[in-house]
Image: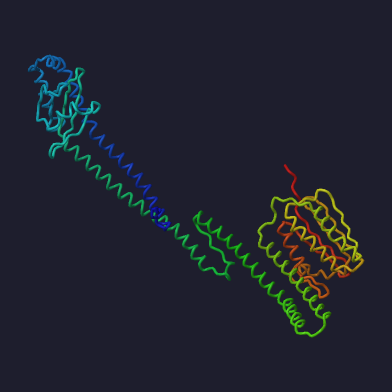
Amino acid sequence: MTAAWQPRSLRVRLTASFVLLGGLLVTVAALGASALVARAVWLPLDAALTEEAADLALVLREEIRESRRGATLDHGAHDAVEQIAGERDLGKGKFVVIVDAAGKPLATHGRIPDGVLRTVVAGDPATRAYFLTEGEHAYRVVRHPDEDGTWVVVGVRADRQRHGVLRARWALGAGATALLIVLGAIAWRITSRATAEIDGIAAELEALEAESLHRRVSRRDTSEVDRLAVALNRLLERLDRAVSHLRRFTADAAHELRTPLAALRARLETALASDAGADAQRDGVIDALEQTERLSILAEDLLTLSAVEASDDVVTGEEVDLSSVAREVCDFLEPVAEEQGRALVLTTEPDVTVPGSARLLKRVLVNVLDNAFRHTRAGGGITVDVARAGGMVTVRVSDDGPGFDASDPERVFRRFGHRSTRHSGAGLGLAICQEIVRKHHGRLEVHSSPHGGTTVTFALPARQPAA
């Protein structure tokens, strides 16, 4: 079964909803006003007719009881009926009829419309006043029961009142229709303004391209639409960052992978074309394997850096003990340090827990120590110190290597900006460290001197104690 058709236009939907709700309220108000008008017209007439019927029933009560024993109404009773029926203060066409419990008329005066006698006994006993039409004339009829079952019925022609009520209803209907049209026009105007702002946002978004993601949607006057514009601007900002990260990753990969891939291909082609012996072939394979390993490290660094940059926040509910992380990394690198004759010393303090990612923070320490190992001469020393100062946990890695000119400290954090031909690093290590520390809401600093010694320090917000 298919769903009912609905218009796709927000303007049409809002206007239709407003008109339907307004129509319901206007209809209820018009019906209520019509009921009040009818009550105002009929209530005084019903009260006057009821009063006359009650007076007549009181005067004729004894005669009506005699008629129930077979007697007839005397001339005095008939005179009372004629007197009341002859009064013209309520209008023309007045009539009076006395009916017993069986529906037999005991006395009448005036012209009795058809249907009056049928409705006296057969009608609902709770209904005392009702409306009756005969031809082109309308009558208002009131019946008054006596305590012995006799009915006194008084009626009068009510053409003027009926026409007045009808005219009032037509006027109320016309006014309600006009009001509904005005409400619909107002709703269309209001929704047009709101949807015009949405159309403006859509037009601005359609004009955006990949090269213009730095542009932002202009703010709007309506608070709800302005909120949409703010949310879209945040989305555009994230999209711009993601596209920038993708472009930078693509450019870095294309730039850095081109040289080792070309070298690897040249080496393999040379090995295939060479008629040298097995030793030369083996040397070529070993060289190709080294190039492949370099490519693998470079690709992993590029992917790690891109993933960290694309992430808005890497700090989750995980708590990381930097003392355990540092001890694990130092235990892993201790055999390498012993083999190269380097002294690797670790000192830690208690309560050095930070919120963050243990995997990424371990990567920071590994990269920093890898730089220290590669830039420290054999027999040199490397120290790792983990301490807490106030609300920060600081990890400091120092070496006694040759150092470098720190006049431009940001140069060491640039991608591929601090490489040496003597080392196999890809130039991404500290760039990755800086990005990871920044995403942990910390800071990373490098202090070095061309006379020797480099210290890399990164500080992270410590875990807040439970309340």
Residue 392 x %, y %: 78, 52
The residue at the far front in this view is 278
Q: Is residue 285 left or right of residue 65?
A: right
Which residue is at 15% across, 30% downward? 116
Residue 80 picture location, percent across and down? 11, 20
Say above or below: 165 vs 389: above
Compared to residue 177, the image places residue 332 above or below, namely: below
Q: Which residue is painted at 16% across and 27% down in the image? A: 154
Image coordinates of residue 269 in percent, x first then y, are 74, 82
Query: Which quarter of the figure has residue 240?
Result: bottom right
Q: Is residue 193 above or below residue 378?
A: above
User: Quadrant of residue 89 in the image?
Assistant: top left
Give the position of the C terminus as an image quadrant.
Answer: top right
Residue 409, relative to residue 90: is it above or below?
below
Side of 212 where 195 appears, left or right: left
- Left or right: where 422 falls relative to 258: right
Left or right: residue 300 compared with residue 221: right
**Which of 137/101 is in front?**
101
Give whichever of 113, 124 is nearer the camera: 124
Q: Residue at x 61, y 62 (%)?
A: 238
Which one is in front, 197 or 256? 256
